[in-house]
Amino acid sequence: MQRSLIFHFLRWSMGFSALLVLGCIATLVFFLLSKGWPAWNTQLFFGNTNPLDAILGRAPLWEGIWSAFMGTLCLIAATMALVLLPGIGCGIFLAEYASSTWNKRLSTAIDLLAGAPSIVMGLFGFTLILFLRRTFLPEANTCLLLAAGCLSLLVTPVLVVNTREALEAVPRSIKLAAS
């Protein structure tokens, strides 16, 4: 009887807590939409430039958030292009082909890479640019490829670990049936 009462109280309090959090989120979203809706127009994205000319690249865009938005999408695409093949390939290698020695060494390296803070990766990219400017390429500057390379160092461990765990979760009988 006592356990049942405690169980019902905990269940009710968790439900109330969940509703309270959802209510707070709904209030925040409503406030943002009601106050921010008037600002959502083409001038927010393109400034005083014609939207079609800005999208097609016929006119330079000095105002608005369209440039930042497209730069972010290009950075994500470049990062995924750099990380997909090596990340999935390394995950497959670790799950299927690596000996225990290689598995242990690569897993340690991947765990170390996963533990590096993002600010360290940014400093690595900045240091790389400084090194390139002083030694090989005096005209080197920050670019999309360097930013994508730094982000790919952050994304690679997640992709490798997820690929490896997904392949290790497949039963051996299904693997043999598929071959």
Image (spheres, rainbow, N blue to C red):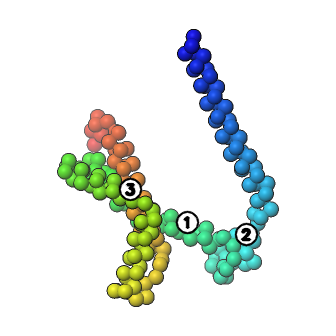
Type of the residue with mark 3: Gly
Q: Of 13 and 169, which appears nearest the observer?
A: 13
- Image location (x, y in percent) of residue 2: 57, 13
Q: Viewer-proximal residue, 145 or 2?
A: 2
Q: Quadrant of residue 171?
A: top left
Label 2: few (<14), some or many (≥20) within 10 Å? few
Q: Is residue 96 above or below residue 19?
A: below
- Point out residue 129 in the picture as x, y percentages from the top left corner: 41, 79
**Residue 88 visible, this angle:** no
Marks 3 and 1 sit apart, C-alpha to C-alpha, by 26 Å
Precedes in sequence: disc 2 or disc 1: 2
Q: Secondary structure at mark 3?
A: loop
Residue furthest to the bottom: 138
Residue under label 2: 44
Query: Which residue is under mark 1?
Result: 73
Q: From mark 2 to mark 1, how far is it between C-alphas?
A: 18 Å
Callout 1, which amino acid?
Answer: Leu
Q: What's the residue at 75%, 78% (across, down)?
A: 48
The numbered disc on residue 115 is: 3
Residue farthest to the top? Answer: 1
Expressed as whole percent of the image width and height from the top left, the position of residue 50 reads: 73, 77
| Of the two numbered discs 2 and 1 in the rendering, the one whose residue sits closer to the viewer | 2
